[in-house]
Image (cartoon, rainbow, N blue to C red):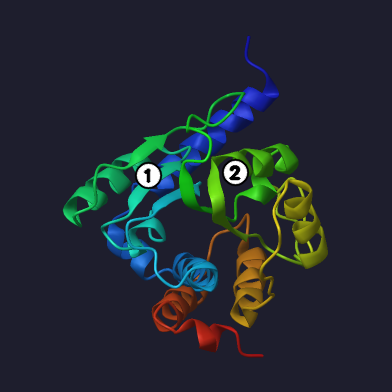
Amino acid sequence: MSTPAHHAAEANRQAYDEYYHKPDWWFRWRYDTQVKRKVCLALARRLRRRWDGASIFELGFGSGATLLSFPASCRLSGIEISPSALAHLRAEAARRGFAEPQLAHPPASGPLPFPDASQDLVLASHVLEHVPDDAACLRELHRLLKPGGGLVVLVPLNERHADPNHVRHYTTATCRAAAEQAGFATVWTEENEWLYYLVERLYWRHVGRRWSPPAAAARVAFNLLTAPLPLALCRLG
């Protein structure tokens, strides 16, 4: 028997599946995709200068932009709700010379379908705010890591608007506390990205209604101008 939660989960899966059907260039020129990728890579460099040959796992890898930014000698794996995202990452990984990635849909319950201590680096970018039990999720990510491995987590901090898709809101302190309770030792935390606040304000001003032509043109121009920016410029302010 279907439940409201089941219907909501299925609607969420369909929405993401449609979104990740978009062509690769769409994500190369989206500010939010590119800035998340750059932040993940910058934090990964703080953990280890080079990742050649490493096993790298991403929870909710989406367009695959972050995973595919690592050297082709890396062994990629990940979890994603969208079938189109899984197919896209497999095709792009093959095209770029990676070994076949180990990918799966999220399980309905129970552990992630990957062995203990199998990953050198685990990434979770803008995922924890969506999962019902972030503590259990973080414990699973801890289970996947090899001794001495690293976790990179990105979450929206101090949100000024209530996103109905988020089940919780984080501050730096609450995110750090959740990670440490799951067994992680914090190496580095930071708040940055002043441009995100402009994105957030622009998005929520138009949510639930049609974009006017001038607003749509401004949105396109914003993405084209900001997607290529180096991360240092996104951190100004």
Q: Residue 46 at what x, y percent from top left?
A: 54, 73
Quick check: 64 above or below 227? above
Q: Residue furthest front?
A: 147
> Is 56 displayed left or right of 10 in the figure?
left
Q: Residues within 10 Å of mark 2 (few under 14, many from 20)?
A: many
Q: Residue 231 at what x, y percent from top left?
A: 50, 81
Q: Is residue 165 visible?
A: no
Residue 103 or residue 85, whichever sits in front: 103
Identified at 68% across, 50% down, the residue is 129
Quick check: 217 above or below 36? below
> Is 130 displayed left or right of 12 in the figure?
right
Q: Residues within 10 Å of mark 1 (few under 14, many from 20)?
A: many
To which quarter of the image does residue 138 belong?
top right
Q: Residue furthest top?
A: 1
| Front: mark 2 or 1 | 2
Q: Which quadrant is the C terminus positioned in? A: bottom right
Q: Which quadrant is the N terminus positioned in? A: top right
Q: Secondary structure at mark 2?
A: helix
Q: What's the residue type where badge 1 is placed?
A: Ala
Name the residue tied to disc 1: 85
Label total for image: 2
Residue 119 or residue 78, whichever sits in front: 119
Identified at 50% across, 74% down, the residue is 42
Residue 142 or residue 24, whichever sits in front: 142
Sooner in the amino-acid sequence: mark 2 or mark 1: 1
Identified at 36% across, 48% down, the residue is 76
Question: Residue 15 — which label?
Answer: none
Q: Is residue 114 visible?
A: yes
**Mark 2 near mark 1, Cβ–Cβ under 8 Å?**
no
Name the residue tied to disc 2: 141
Q: What's the residue type where badge 2 is placed?
A: Leu
Q: Residue 154 at what x, y percent from top left?
A: 61, 61
